[in-house]
Image (spheres, rainbow, N blue to C red):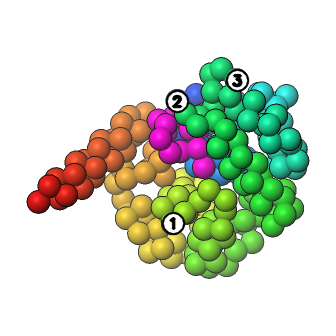
């Protein structure tokens, strides 16, 4: 088992940031599409470095959109789609500022039921049902902060196994999640051919 609860990247500094900064974890989950998981979850640390060593939701929310796009586009780009992801991160940061006083952890620290937490996650810009379920699973499996009963709302992601980033608990786990995702895609493709 690694020293952090979120050993998602293989980079100790990036994993430590995810472990202790709710905004970083939310941004990593937001970036986790159409890029490798490790790259997505390393993005918050790289963004922090590019913003002068701070990952401040108020600063990000208030940035000129063109400037933030440039930060995301600098080589190496923070995402395969740096422009659209920069805007999503800006909107996510604005939501954290407006709804949670700039402290992302308040989203899960003062919630009483798993449904209320899921509803909060579902309202995040750039999050749909699947991202909300996976993030709920991260909060439950990795951080131990989701209200009792979260597993039911998380669906398959709440079950034991290696279904998502929420199941990454140390070396080799990312590969197991990747294998699972590939098998699900193969099954779906085979089902379409029938």
Query: Front-most of 102 and 192?
Result: 192
Residue 99 visible somewhere in the drawing: yes
Query: Front-most of 169 and 130?
Result: 130
Kindly check if marks 2 and 3 are in contact, taking CB atoms under 8 A apart as contact.
no
Q: Position of residue 48 (x, y in %)?
A: 76, 33
| Other-residue count near label 3 (Cα within 10 Å), few / some / many at <14 / 14–19 / ≥20 | few
Separation of marks 2 and 1 at Cα, in angstroms: 27 Å
Residue 150 lies, with reference to residue 87, above or below; the image says below
Residue at image coords 27%, 52%? 184
| Majority SS type along the magenta span | helix
Circle 1 SS class: helix
Query: Relative to residue 7, is residue 101 drawn left or right?
Result: right
Front tag of 1 and 3: 3
Q: Which residue reaches farthest left?
A: 194
Front tag of 2 and 3: 3
Kindly check if marks 1 and 3 are in contact, taking CB atoms under 8 A apart as contact.
no
Circle 2 SS class: loop
The residue tagged 1 is 129
Residue 169 visible somewhere in the drawing: no
What's the magenta region?
30-42
| Other-residue count near label 2 (Cα within 10 Å), few / some / many at <14 / 14–19 / ≥20 | some
Place residue 65 in its image quadrant.
top right
Separation of marks 1 and 3 at Cα, in angstroms: 31 Å
Q: Position of residue 179 (x, y in %)?
A: 30, 41
The residue tagged 2 is 10
The residue tagged 3 is 74
Q: Position of residue 90 (x, y in %)?
A: 76, 48
Check residue 34 for magenta coloring: yes
Q: Earlier in the sequence, mark 2 or mark 3?
A: 2
């Amino acid at each position: 088992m690694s020293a952090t609860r979120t050993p998602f990247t293989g980079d100790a500094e990036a994993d430590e940031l995810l472990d202790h900064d709710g905004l970083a974890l939310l941004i990593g989950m937001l970036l986790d599409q159409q890029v490798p998981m490790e790259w997505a979850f390393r993005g918050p640390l790289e963004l922090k470095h590019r913003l002068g060593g701070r990952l401040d939701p108020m600063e990000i929310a208030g940035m000129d959109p063109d400037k933030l796009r440039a930060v995301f586009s600098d080589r190496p780009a923070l995402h395969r789609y740096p422009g659209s992801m920069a805007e999503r991160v800006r909107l996510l940061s604005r939501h954290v500022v407006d709804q949670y006083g700039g402290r992302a952890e308040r989203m899960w620290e003062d919630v009483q039921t798993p449904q209320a937490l899921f509803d909060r996650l579902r309202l995040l810009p750039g999050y749909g049902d699947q991202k909300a379920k996976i993030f709920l699973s991260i909060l439950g499996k990795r951080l131990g902060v989701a209200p009792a009963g979260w597993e039911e709302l998380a669906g398959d992601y709440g079950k034991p196994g290696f279904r998502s980033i929420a199941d990454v608990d140390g070396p080799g786990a990312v590969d197991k999640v990747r294998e699972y995702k590939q098998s699900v895609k193969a099954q779906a493709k085979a089902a379409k051919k029938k």
